[in-house]
Amino acid sequence: MIKVLLAMVACQAAAALAAFTLPVVAPAAARALGLPAALVGYYTTVMLVGAMLATVVTAGFVRRYGALRVSQATLVFAALGLGALPFAHLPGLALPVLLGGAVLIGFAYGPANPASSHLLARVTPAPLRGRVFSVKQTSVPLGGALGGFSLPFLEARFGWQGAALCAAGFCLLLALALQPWRREMDNDRTANAPLVNAGFVTAMKIALTEPGLRRLAFASGAFAAMQFCYVALFVTFAVERTGLTLQTAGTALSAGLVVSIGARMLWGWAADRFAPRYVLAGLGLGMAASAFAATALGPAWPYAAVVALAIGFGSTGTAWQGVYLAEVARNAPEGRVAEATAGCMSFTFMGGLIGPGAASALAVLTGDNAAGFLFMGAVTFFFGAAFLWPGKKTPD
């Protein structure tokens, strides 16, 4: 179990690093390309379109090639997406390259959870599921923290294009390093398994018809919208609202993501000890409180308060997926964890897809870049409160 957990943490951390790369260096990239920094919200939206499209067909590839091989393929897609970014400076290619790179990184980010859930569900005892899945999900803040700490300094030394190429190289090296474990971890693959076989319809049907999964799927969309707004927009938001440098704002983001590592494990332990729906309710309400507080951010805020706000977001808005995915695995039909996870994650990515773009659109329409956080706070408050009512399937 430990070897599987380590492999999946490493793969998802690299995918998260790839997803966070452009958002972290967005102010520098925007200046170099002559584009508004707020467009990073749309970049993240396009990335999540790629993630959603890849997620719904992941189960077939997992069954034919194995979950570790799929994870290695995601790392190659991440490297390709990051490696394309330096070509954005060529005349007339900025938007096509950025959007194409976003789709490729989405192909990396999307299948990571169904593949890892398939492997971990095989080897994890039920009483430890909340903690193990939460530890696995520490990979996201690990990747984000790695990006938040390293990318601004790599950008200062090599430019934003060089920072992207460094992240691409890391992904490729990890894909190669995992190869010796492939035979052992993919010993359940079926060579002639169908790749699609109505995978999208099957995954969505499971997510929508299983009462224990339906509420999780819808709530995950709202929580993901908040998560991706924070990751994609916080650095730019803090720089514009307070006048902080890219490095100091990136460090605040990283502080929130580092704290979320411990928070994820705490919430996983709590979900194994108490009713998971109450843990999810508390997380949703905590996200709302952080978003409402962000609307007051301004130049008078001391840096410690900015870091505290980032920690508030990190310990809630980026710390919920372990509990969520463990609940998806618990409520999935027997032998259909990959399909159930893919179906529910489609709603997760749909929320993440809509969130940053909607926040950017609200900022443009209202002239206030806090409008997106105000809206996300209201949405997460509603879905957090929804977990306070009992579900209709098995008791928590």
Image (cartoon, rainbow, N blue to C red):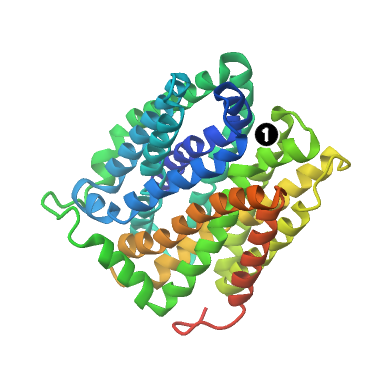
Q: Nearer the viewer, residue 200 or 331?
A: 200
Q: Is residue 257 above or below residue 336?
A: above
- Determine whether, in the image, residue 224 is placed left or right of residue 96: right
Tell how many labels. Answer: 1
Mark 1, residue position: 250
Residue shown at the point (57%, 73%) measured from the top left? 277
Q: Is residue 33 visible?
A: yes
Which of the 4 image quarters holds residue 241? top right
Which of the 4 image quarters holds residue 335? bottom left
Q: Is residue 261 visible?
A: no
Residue shown at the point (63%, 26%) measured from the top left? 152
Residue shown at the point (78%, 47%) measured from the top left? 308
Residue shown at the point (42%, 70%) measured from the top left? 330
Expressed as whole percent of the image width and height from the top left, the position of residue 196 reads: 20, 56
- Determine whether, in the image, residue 118 is placed left or right of residue 12: left
Q: Residue furthest right?
A: 300
